[in-house]
Amino acid sequence: MAVSKERFNELFDRLSVKDLELVSEIMERLSQSDANKKIPLDDEPTTQDDLNAINNAREAYLKGELLTLKDVEHELRN
């Protein structure tokens, strides 16, 4: 979806101070140069703790024990 700068500015002007902080952080990350976005390869071996965490997460997913986006937004904003 293409968004014009005018539309973006219109939406930006509607944000609360709290929302501006969150949007500002996101914009900062998105506007970084490609050189800064490169993430080094994780070459550490997978530990048993890692495998346990992965399995626990998979089980929680299958049981429907998930956080919603609204839960995450609420936690970030409060």
Image: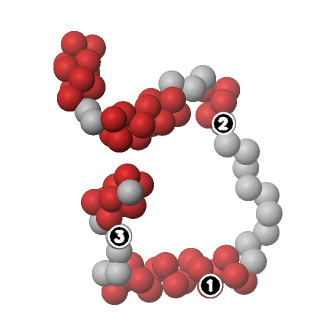
Q: Nearer the viewer, mark 2 or mark 3?
A: 3
The residue carrying mark 3 is 67
Q: Earlier in the sequence, mark 2 or mark 1?
A: 2
Quadrant of the frame with the C terminus: bottom left
Nearer the observer, 22 or 38:
22
Q: Position of residue 18 (x, y in %)?
A: 35, 41
Helix, strand or loop for disc 3: loop
Q: Earlier in the sequence, mark 2 or mark 3?
A: 2
Nearer the observer, 17 or 26:
17
Q: Nearer the viewer, mark 3 or mark 1?
A: 3
Nearer the observer, 11 or 78:
78
| Residue 28 appears left or right of 36 | left
Can I make out residue 3 in this image? no
What residue is drawn where x is 73% and y is 49%?
41
Compared to 36, does 74 lie above or below?
A: below
**Type of amino acid at the residue the image marks with label 1:** Asn
Contact, mark 2 vs mark 1 (Cβ under 8 Å): no
Tell which residue pokes out farthest to the top in this image: 6
